[in-house]
Image (cartoon, coloured by chain):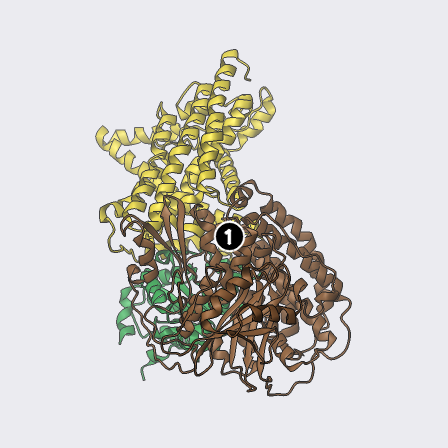
Amino acid sequence: MTDQALLDKVLAFAPGKVAVEEYVNTYPALRVEADALHDLARFLKENEETDFDYLMCLSGVDWGANLGVVYHLRSTRHGHVLVLKTQTPERITPTIDTISDLWVGAEFHEREVYDMFGIRFTNHPDMRRIFMSDKWMGFPLRKDYQASNPLHLETEGAYEDEGIRKLASGKGKDETFIINFGPQHPSTHGVLRLVITLEGENVDQVQPHCGYIHRGIEKMCEHLTYQQIVHLTDRMDYLSAHINNEAVCLCVEKALQVEVPLRAQYIRTIMDELTRVASHLLFWTSFGMDLGATTCFFYSMRERDHILDIFEETCGARLVLSYVCPGGVMYDLHPNFQRRVKDFIREMRRRLPEYHRLLSGNVIFQGRSRNIGVLSHENAVSFGVTGPSGRASGWHCDVRKQDPYHVYSQVDFQEAIRTEGDVFARYMLRMDELETSLNIIEQLIDQIPSGDYAAKMKPVIRVPEGEYYQRVETARGDLGVWLVSQGDKFPYRLKFRSPGFSTLAALPHLCHGFKIADLIAISGSLDFVIPDIDR
Amino acid sequence: MMPTDFKDNEALEQLRESGTNVVLTTVSDLVSWGRANSLWPLMFATSCCGIEIMAAGAARTDFSRFGIEVYRSSPRQADLMVVAGTIVHKMAPVLKRLYDQMADPKYVVAMGNCAISGGPFRDSYHVVNGIEDIIPVDVYIPGCPVRPEALLYGIMQLQRKIKVSYSLPLGKKEEDK
Amino acid sequence: MIYDFSKLTSSLDQLLLSVLPPFWVLLVEALLVLIAGLAAFAVLGMILVYMERKVCAFFQVRLGPNRVGKWGTLQLIADMLKLLTKELVTPRGVDVLLYNVAPFIIIMAAFLSFGALPFARGLHAIDFNIGVFYLMAVSSLAVLGILLGGWASNNKYTVIGAMRSGAQVVSYELSVGLTYITMVAFAGTMQLSGIVEAQADGWFLFKGHLPALIAFVVFLIASTAEANRGPFDLAEAESELIAGYHTEYSGLRFAFFYLAEYLNMFIGAAIAATLFLGGWMPLHIGSWEAFNAVMDFIPPIVWFFGKTFLLVWVTMWFKWTFPRLRIDQLLTLEWKYLMPVSFFNLLLMTVIILLGWHF
């Protein structure tokens, strides 16, 4: 269906309540009255021709006079995208109908919007703040947010938390065995907090608590120029720092319609894949450690260090590269780059069978990962679990294939897919992707064209008025950047649709009925990076 | 200004050599030596710097060479807390609690700009501008993120500091002034 | 010929008897044994921890401690000094008595087993005629300490760790016991010195055919599990339960748990060496007189520690290679595989003994 046909169809569904948005936008957009939203969303999801089963992004925005919520919907079958925009009539007690009954993944996103903008979603199953503590004053992402919140150092009692009270309410406080994983726990990979209820060794419910590393990046971006923003994005998903940088730059370039030199595109693609390899190596490390196989740590860190050396030689940093800038890359490649990358590929190919011998083939490992935490294809789409975790459930969700950017359309590679959806599939998929990435790099490394490494850009970038959306495939999945510009040198609103956030929403669903040890394996196999979740 | 106000290692070492305290015992020195060479860190990392701690523990810069080997996840058994990464308002009580849970003697290293001052996130509404508002810090290691080599250097500075400090109460009097 | 330490001890006994009344002699000897035992205990603990760090480092392509003293040999002294002077935290809400007693029970259980080990001919604290039985009895005491420690700490992680450990040790105790019985049946005695002497013309591992081999493998697995070593370290399970049953312990009390883990590993290996590899007995092959004489030249104490440390090394190899088991895998392994195999093996051994099919 063409965009126009799609719009016509939707306009016919609810005449008078829906209007086509005339604003500049990456995707066809519709303005919907708040009271018609839920019916329209249901229609869009359940109609065969539209079939919007994947909620790509749900973002709140403060328009000044009123608050808005913007939904980016995508159909995995037809591949079309539609943006729905709705607004609350006023900003004192704003309410909007929830769509979490249609897309399960919306539950967390709506909680985030409530936390940041104070928009209450009616009929939402669990309307609590998600990042900030319950005592926090004000809604930080509103433009008029000025509340001063002093630093509290006293630890709050467990039952002061609304969510934990809710968990305990099932059987009474004394009968439920509630146990707290994190925020400081060796296996939550950072400061994620999971409150779980146990039946013996079996996990009954899991309740993720986020916000222990919520740094307010989205708010900070509203006061930074586009070149500066790039440096904050590194620190969200620091394991795919380079790809995160790129997301913002691609979005800005798309808005400005800048042609990035081919050389820069090649460099970016290669760096992308190197980052992915480094990230998956770290996954192997931490996953092995979660399962108690400590030696994995040292083996893959050894290989990862080679990649970091290559990064360091070219851009001076090991982890947070900030190598990309709007228009290209900051500096040219180091003369050693190609040789060292080729050396690394050779080395890595030699090591991969060793990894499989040490961990993948182990009886204990197989017993602990097969048929554990199975995520079905439908649930993966509904929760929005993208990236390797989504592909392990058989969902073709690779942005590099769907919306190719850079030179991915010219590279010959297979999207790794597995259909089991269990821990082992997620693990093996990442191992497959290691090989895919090596193949991609190998194809490109000798083809880097000469020329400029960056397009000429103005020192102060003013993005033309409009709304832009850019997706990239990080090592964790579909990272979306939604940029609202009002023609200023700062963005009006910058939303990151982080892959980890949607993946986290699926965790409670996956863990029910498994053992504590499985919980660790499942959360390890989903490969979170907590600052990516919390932003 | 008292000579003890100088908190750098050179001044502390000079102070020891110049013999401000007569009752230096070898026992105290021995215990200090033991403590300095057996720093068991608490597994604590909030963001990017945590990955560099992992890298520092990995084969290339293997910091078990210096006796920093046994990573404890329980604060009760750890001596050293490397605060790696941003501390936000919601995390601050947890950080303080972890510090309180550690058994004496305990040391804190603020690793990375975020832990020192809030770093690139200083202007954010939810970020603590430096962990010194919450817990006392022994060594600050700047960097964003801190390189493994820098972390090693920082921890070796801490070891120097521990070696010159009095581990038995007999030296306390001079220090408390 | 092999030196008999009982000559040394009996001459010492004679010497003391000549100057002191018998009761005082007993007291002095008990004291001497205690001091010697404790010293050996501490030194062994440090050697084991040092060995673990080095072995683990070499498995993991790194160097391990090498800055404190030559090759890091003083590292353990530093660790010990640190642990001795660390604050003992008693968290609020713990059962103070049990909380304090638990580490001692654990270290005592290890020490009690340690006393019965024959290090060389005549070199053991006590040589029971029911030595094997005694070892079985005291080595299962350790689980009491773990259970008490986990329960008394008033922490949910420690409770889970303790319960896991309880289930684990009680289950694996069966396999350990059955392999003991298998070997006792073969040796015809429960006295540890007798078992060693019976291996003068060949170790049981070789003499006992298939059943001895099976028993050896089962014993290695089960004793690793009993010592809560990886891949059976579910009670500690660092990535799941912080530090398992000893999460709340600090300083010296924690050091006891830490040390006991290594000593239990050593004791497991030492028992395996005694039962299957001839203990301190040199490698003897039938009637090869010259070969046997050369082997006899190596002191028995070296044989004993050599064999034991080899087995310790094997358990370390396990730990640094395998991922941790899950609790249901662990119990399945014991109840569905190891225990039936051990029963069958005992039967097989009996048949072999009755038919005289062994060497």
Quadrant in the picture for residue A210: bottom left
On screen, residue C91 versus residue A46, left or right, reads left
Seen from the viewer's position, the closer of residues C203 and B23 is C203
Colour given to chain A in the rendered image: brown
Seen from the viewer's position, the closer of residues C145 and C237 is C237
The quadrant of the image that shows the C terminus of chain C is top right
Colour given to chain B in the rendered image: green
Seen from the viewer's position, the closer of residues B96 and A473 is A473
Q: Which residue is mark 1?
A: A289
Q: Is residue A450 above or below residue B66?
A: below
Q: Is residue C265 above or below residue A248?
A: above
The percent coordinates of residue B162 (x first, y second) are 39, 67
Residue C63 visible somewhere in the drawing:
no
What secondary structure is marked by label 1?
helix
The percent coordinates of residue C103 (x first, y second) are 31, 45
| Residue that lies at the very extreme toward the top in this rendered image | C355
Colour given to chain C in the rendered image: yellow
Residue C262 visible somewhere in the drawing:
yes
On screen, residue C145 versus residue A435, left or right, reads left
Q: Is residue A466 above or below residue A390?
A: below
The percent coordinates of residue C131 (x first, y second) are 37, 26
Q: Amino acid at mark 1?
A: Met
